[in-house]
C-alpha cells in the first residue's frame, strides 16, 4: 500500500490537533489532511481520495452524519471508511445511527492514543483488503464474461450445425445413397441431374462451414488482421468471378461498378469474406433475371461500398433482426437456398475490426442495399 492518506474533520482546533499529534507520533508514514466542517472535508475527499476519514459529529455547515451520506452517494468516494469521533453523541443509539449511515467505527473524545492508533491501523488494513477484493471481483467479472461469451458462441455453433449443416448433409447422403443403390438403372441425363443436385448441396455445406470456421476464429479473437492500402476493385472482382456461375443459373447479372483507381485500407481476406457474403445474399434473394450491382461512394476518410439487388426486399421489422449479433434464423432464398444469417454476423465482426459501419436499406418487392464503410487511410 502507498503512503496512507488520512483526513481529519473537526470544527475545534484542540481536538483536531490532538488527533493529528497522535498520528504524527507513530512510526508509520501517514499523509494527513484536515478540515473544519463536512463541506470542506467532502471537497478534499473528492480531490485526494483519502484511505480513511476520522470525523467529528456536530459541526457547522455539514455535520459528520451528513458527510457520510454525501460520501456514500458518490461512487468514486463511497468506499472510503469513516471513523466517527465525538465527545457528545456517545449513547448506544448514537452509535447505531452512525453505523447505520455507513460509519465503520466509533471512538469517544477525548481520544485514547492506543485505542485510536489500533482502530486506524485496523481500518486501514480492512480498507486495503476491501480494495484487493474489489480488484479481484473486477478480474473475475471479466473472466466470467469471457466464459459466458464462449458458451454463447458454442451454443450458436451448435445451433448452426444443427439447422444449417444437418439438412444439406442429410440431403447429400440421400442423393448419394439413391444413386449408388440404382446406379445401373439411371440414364446419363438422370445421373447428371443428380450430380448437379449433389454439387449444389455440397456448395451450400462448404459455404456454411467456411463461414462457421471464420466466425469461430473471430469469437476467439483469433482473426489475422493485416490491413494495407489497396484497390477495392480487386476484392470485388475476385468474388464476382467466384459467384458468377451461381448467378448465371438464376439468370442474374452481377455488375462490378467499382472504378479502377479507388483505394482503401483493409485486410483483403476479411473484406473479401464480407463482399462474398453480401453478393451471395443478394443472389440468394433475387429472382430469375434480376441484377446485383456493386458500387462505391467516395468519402474523405471512409469510402462506402454498396451491394444492391433487385430482389424481394426486407421488411422494416426484419432489418433490425438481421443485424442483431444475438439472433440467428434460418431463411430461404428465391430458389429455396437455405441460410442461417451467420454470413451477415461475420460481416458485422469484420467491418467492426476495420472501425467501419454497416447498414441496410431495403424496400419490399423492390430490392435491398447493403452498405459498409472502409477507411481511406
Image: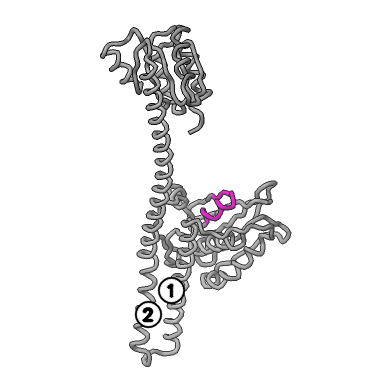
Q: Position of residue 362 (x, y in %)?
A: 51, 51
Give the number of marks: 2
Q: Secondary structure at mark 2?
A: helix
Q: CA distance from mark 2 to mark 1?
A: 10 Å
Q: Position of residue 264 (x, y in %)?
A: 67, 55
Is residue 102 visible to the viewer in this orientation of the structure? no
What residue span does the magenta drawing correspond to? 347-358
Q: Secondary structure at mark 1?
A: helix
Q: Is residue 128 or residue 170 the one in the foreground?
A: 128
Residue labelled with disc 1 = 201
Q: Is residue 108 or residue 9 the one in the foreground?
A: 108
Residue 356 in the magenta stretch? The answer is: yes
Residue labelled with disc 2 = 175
Residue 310 in the magenta stretch? The answer is: no
Figure check: 234 above or below 196 = above
- The numbered mark, 2 or 1, whose residue comes first in the sequence reads 2
Is residue 321 visible to the viewer in this orientation of the structure? yes
Amino acid at each position: 500500500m502507498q503512503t496512507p492518506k488520512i483526513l481529519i474533520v473537526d470544527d475545534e482546533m484542540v481536538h483536531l490537533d490532538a488527533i493529528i499529534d497522535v498520528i504524527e507520533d507513530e512510526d508509520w508514514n501517514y499523509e494527513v489532511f484536515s478540515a473544519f466542517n463536512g463541506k470542506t472535508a467532502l471537497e478534499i475527499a473528492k480531490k485526494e481520495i483519502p484511505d480513511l476519514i476520522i470525523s467529528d459529529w456536530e459541526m457547522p455547515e455539514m455535520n459528520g452524519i451528513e458527510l457520510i451520506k454525501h460520501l456514500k452517494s458518490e461512487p468514486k468516494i463511497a468506499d472510503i471508511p469513516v471513523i466517527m469521533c465525538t465527545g457528545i453523541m456517545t449513547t448506544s443509539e448514537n452509535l447505531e445511527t452512525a453505523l447505520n449511515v455507513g460509519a465503520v467505527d466509533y471512538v469517544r473524545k477525548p481520544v485514547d492514543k492506543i485505542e485510536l492508533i489500533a482502530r486506524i491501523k485496523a481500518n486501514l488494513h480492512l480498507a486495503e483488503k476491501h480494495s484487493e477484493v474489489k480488484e479481484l471481483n473486477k478480474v473475475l467479472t471479466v473472466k466470467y464474461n469471457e466464459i459466458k461469451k464462449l458458451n454463447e458462441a458454442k451454443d450458436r455453433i451448435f445451433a448452426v450445425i444443427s439447422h444449417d449443416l444437418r439438412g444439406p448433409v442429410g440431403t447429400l447422403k440421400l442423393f448419394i445413397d439413391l444413386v449408388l443403390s440404382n446406379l445401373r438403372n439411371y440414364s446419363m441425363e438422370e445421373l447428371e441431374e443428380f450430380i448437379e443436385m449433389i454439387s449444389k448441396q455440397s456448395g451450400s455445406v462448404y459455404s456454411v462451414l467456411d463461414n462457421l470456421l471464420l466466425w469461430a476464429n473471430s469469437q476467439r479473437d483469433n482473426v489475422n488482421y493485416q490491413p494495407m492500402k489497396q484497390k477495392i476493385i480487386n476484392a470485388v472482382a475476385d468474388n464476382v468471378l467466384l459467384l458468377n456461375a451461381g448467378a448465371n443459373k438464376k439468370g442474374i447479372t452481377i455488375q462490378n461498378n467499382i472504378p479502377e483507381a479507388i483505394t482503401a485500407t483493409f485486410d483483403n481476406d476479411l473484406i473479401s469474406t464480407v463482399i462474398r457474403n453480401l453478393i451471395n445474399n443478394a443472389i440468394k434473394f433475387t429472382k430469375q433475371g434480376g441484377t446485383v450491382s456493386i458500387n462505391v461512394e467516395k468519402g474523405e476518410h471512409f469510402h462506402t461500398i454498396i451491394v444492391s439487388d433487385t430482389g424481394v426486399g426486407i421488411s422494416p421489422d426484419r432489418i433490425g433482426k438481421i443485424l442483431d449479433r444475438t439472433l440467428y434464423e434460418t431463411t430461404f432464398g428465391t430458389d429455396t437456398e437455405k441460410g442461417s444469417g451467420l454470413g451477415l454476423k461475420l460481416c458485422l465482426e469484420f467491418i467492426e475490426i476495420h472501425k467501419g459501419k454497416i447498414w441496410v436499406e431495403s424496400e419490399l418487392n423492390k430490392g435491398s442495399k447493403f452498405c459498409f464503410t472502409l477507411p481511406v487511410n
